[in-house]
Image (tube, grey):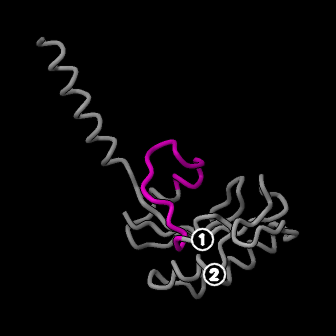
Amino acid sequence: EKGKQFFCSARHEDSKTMASNQVGAYHLLIKNEQSRNPVSRRTNEPTNMTEEEAIAELTEIKKKITPETFQQVAAERSDCGSYANGGDLGMFGPGEMMKPFEDATRALQVGEISDIVKTDSGVHLIMRYA
């Protein structure tokens, strides 16, 4: 009995720790011909954009985007299926996203927008909300 109680308590503590390790983010993804799946989920069309062109476009977006406009811009331009929810990826914990994406998200303060982050999916802007 005593062992079981301890085990349940330890699990409860682990679940609290896991919840506190979660972050929430919006993102805007621009895919390119080097993306692991170079088809936009917004348009269902393959991209013929080079990585350099994708970075150049995202650089221009970064100059204008704000925390207040992030979701609208993601809905209009992101190539990720999350475009339909303003780029909302929901809450995620350690190891649930590609490492460069997760590391960049965790480095942000809530409400802060990242610099360009490159992953196998393409290039992203990320805004952390939790």
Residue that protrudes farthest toward the left in the picture:
2
Residue contact at pointers 2 and 1, CB within 8 angstroms: yes
The C terminus appears in which quarter of the rendering? bottom left
**Along the line of sight, the residue nearer the viewer: 128 or 37:** 37
Rendering coords of residue 82 (x, y %) = 58, 65
Residue drawn at 80 percent across, 60 percent down: 38
Q: Which residue is mark 1?
A: 83
Rendering coords of residue 32 (x, y %) = 80, 65
Rendering coords of residue 110 (x, y %) = 37, 68
| Label 2 vs 1, first from the N-terminus | 2
Dot 1 surroundings within 10 Å: few (below 14), some, or many (20 or more)? many
| Disc 2 secondary structure class | helix
Residue 60 in the figure: left or right of residue 24:
right
Amino acid tagged 1: Tyr
Residue drawn at 78 percent across, 55 percent down: 37
Amino acid tagged 2: Glu
| Disc 1 secondary structure class | helix
Rendering coords of residue 66 (x, y %) = 49, 84
Q: Within the magenta stretch, is there residue 2?
A: no
Which image quadrant for residue 42? bottom right
